[in-house]
Amino acid sequence: MRQIIYSLTLLLALMNCSVSNSAQNNSVIFNNEKCNENLDFKKEYFYHIKMIDSLVEKSQNKQFTKSLLFVSKYAHVSAESMLNYARTYPYATYEKDRKGWLEWYEKNKCNNIQFKKK
């Protein structure tokens, strides 16, 4: 009889763990704090960073500018550096800014970042 009660208790405990884990949805726990990360924003934000990565040394076209403007809504972009004769975004500035973009995301990702309107 004790063995049956012990088995049932263990079974209920395991079921409770699986239910609580599946109920977290997009939330992740970091350092005992609940992280409410907006995965749609993350996908869009890193899409634009990858677009900038791929075009910074090739063709700083409309898509490049669009992605740079998107990132600049949330993190610092040294736009004044584009005031050069060629009106291009210098690679050295890009490298420095990119580190800031990644740091900004890491610092703010658990705040359920929302898209800013135009």
Image (cartoon, grey):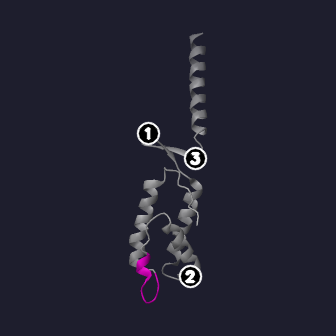
- Which corner quadrant holds the C terminus? bottom right
How far separated are the C-alphas under marks 1 and 2?
44 Å
User: Which image quadrant is residue 107 in?
Assistant: bottom left
Amino acid type, label 1? Asn
Residue matched to label 3: 26
Q: Is residue 39 above or below residue 28?
A: below
Residue 117 pos. (x, y %): 58, 63
Residue 113 pos. (x, y %): 53, 55
User: Which image quadrant is residue 61 in?
Assistant: bottom right
Left or right relative to 20: residue 93: left
Amino acid type, label 2? Asn
Q: Secondary structure at mark 1?
A: loop
Left or right relative to 32: residue 1: right
Q: For this rendering, which residue is in front, 111 or 24? A: 111
**Residue 90 in view (yes/no):** no
Residue 14 pos. (x, y %): 57, 28
Q: Secondary structure at mark 3?
A: loop
**Residue 84 in view (yes/no):** yes
For disc 1, the neighbor class at 10 Å (few under 14, some 14 to 19, many from 20) is: few
Residue matched to label 2: 61
Point out the tag, 3 or 2, that comes first from the N-terminus.
Answer: 3
How far separated are the C-alphas under marks 3 and 2?
35 Å
Region rendered in magenta:
79-88
Residue matched to label 1: 32
Q: Main secondary structure of the magenta part?
A: loop
Q: Residue shown at 42%/86% (left/top)?
A: 84
For disc 2, the neighbor class at 10 Å (few under 14, some 14 to 19, many from 20) is: few
Amino acid type, label 3? Asn
Indicate yes or no whether the magenta region holds residue 54. Answer: no
Q: Residue shown at 43%/83% (left/top)?
A: 83
Indicate yes or no whether the magenta region holds residue 81. Answer: yes
Q: Residue shown at 60%/38% (left/top)?
A: 23
